[in-house]
Image (cartoon, grey):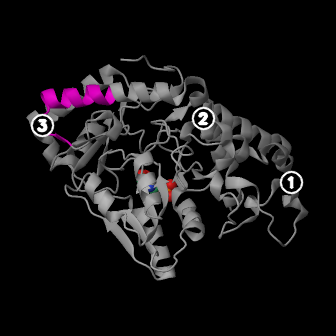
Amino acid sequence: MPPLPRPDAFLLPKGVYLDGNSLGPLTYAAQAAIERRLRQWQVHGVGAWDDWFGLAERLSPAIGRLVGAHPDEVIATASITVNLHALLATFHRPEGRRRHLLATALDFPTDLHALQSWAELRGVELRLMPSRDGHTLADDDLDAALTDDVAFAWLPTVLYRSGQALDVARWTRVAHERGTTVGWDAAHSIGALPHALHDDGVDVAAWCSYKYLNGGPGAPGGLFVHRRHHDVMPALRGWWGHDKATQFAMAPTFARAPAAAAFQLGTPPVLSLAGLEGALALYEEVGIEAVRARSLALTDALIARVDATLPELEVVTPRAHARRGGHVALRHPEAARLSRALRRRGVVPDFRQPDVLRLAPVAWYTSEADLDRTVAVLRELLDGGAYLDEVVDGPIG
Ligand SMILES: Cc1ncc(COP(=O)(O)O)c(C=O)c1O
């Protein structure tokens, strides 16, 4: 097992934290960066904007390295939902019979809400590629769904529930062969595995930074727009997407910033951006390849332990490395109760409807001892049966 890359870098909650794919924990670096920005606010008031102006753009080289993009192809901004709306407004261009939107039946709901909004606004269909087993997408179904009347397809790099990873290069190529523009939701892959968005020819993508990136709750996510689209005017515009050199000339007309930065809308949340700024520094030090190598070793080890000692739990995450993200999804009819009971015993997983327990052994801070403890607690719970008394009435598992 590759060693912990920076064992001293995190301020972890007590117990075994396996929910970094939902909310990454606090790093000392993020804490320090936020405190620094707070001090600037205190000392300089509005004058602090001299330093804060252009902060998102200054993070682009580090983000570009994470997603395999040129710095001008990415920008830290907004949430996935907002970025998806902005990308759809611009890059879904129905023409003739090529007009429809395509997503998958296993997508995160907010993506589907945004896509449905644009289907209604533009009078086109939102088609959902089906899943045969309710957990994963089959290659044949992806191939069949990418018909030449789809104008824009939006796909997950890694499925939020099962952790299945899709082959971004392959499906981007297939979509392009059929004349379809393709975008990717990289929420569950950014910070967990390397990407090559530019070389893969991806048109657009969006992600959040509060999961594996550890940017903090509600930290700005980001978007990618391939260089070949940099002459396209954003359909939704705001003053933060204006050319920085002349933004404060306050002209009524919009002179776009070069490249992906033009897709920003309003004033960025500086304190949250600072959390991301700090957290990115760790990736600059260690590199995403090392993070992925340890993550795969950890998910391998966890799957092996589940196979050996927890036969009641079905591993629904694909086993091939290339088809797996950073978490392991386990199916059990009482997954919600198991999730609650684990939390009570100091192991923090999460639960996703209807019957999936997600465990994310994150490369930065999960040890093999943490895996042993998790499996031992699960074994105890399943043997004792007391977890069946857990009340599962809260919104989050
Ligand atoms: C795949 C995926 N997309 C989108 C979101 C949420 O989007 P937003 O950042 O707009 O809240 C999540 C949140 O967990 C997610 O897992």
For residue 28, say whether it is visible: no
Identify the residue at horizontal 57%, vertical 30% (top origin).
Answer: 283
Q: Which mark is residue 382?
A: 3
Quarter assignment of residue 303: top left
Q: Earlier in the sequence, mark 2 or mark 3?
A: 2
Mark 2 CB lies closer than 8 A to ligand 1: no
Q: Is disc 1 placed on a helix, strand or loop?
A: helix
Badge 2 density bin: few <14, some 14–19, many ≥20, Cα 10 Å: many
Can you give x and y, in whole percent of width and height, for residue 22 in the image?
42, 45
Q: Earlier in the sequence, mark 3 or mark 1?
A: 1
Distance of mark 2 from mark 3, alpha carbons?
Answer: 39 Å
Mark 3 CB lies closer than 8 A to ligand 1: no
Q: Do callouts 2 and 1 mark residues in contact (Cβ within 8 Å)?
A: no
In this view, 4 is above or below 202: above
Q: Earlier in the sequence, mark 2 or mark 1?
A: 1
Residue stretch in magenta: 298-315
Identify the residue at horizontal 25%, vertical 36% (top origin).
Answer: 319
Looking at numbered disc 3 in the image, what kind of residue is underneath it?
Leu
Can you give x and y, in whole percent of width and height, for residue 201 in the image?
53, 50
Prevalent SS, magenta region: helix
Q: Quadrant of ligand 1?
A: bottom left
Residue closer to the observer: 360 or 16 = 360
In this view, 310 is above or below 160: above
Which of the two marks, 2 or 1, is nearer to us in this view? 1
Looking at numbered disc 2 in the image, what kind of residue is underneath it?
Leu
Identify the residue at horizontal 84%, vertical 73% (top origin).
Answer: 252
Q: Is disc 2 placed on a helix, strand or loop?
A: helix
Residue closer to the observer: 108 or 197 = 197
Identify the residue at horizontal 60%, vertical 24% (top origin).
Answer: 285
The residue indicated by pointer 1 is 245
The residue indicated by pointer 2 is 280
| Residue 21 in magenta stretch | no
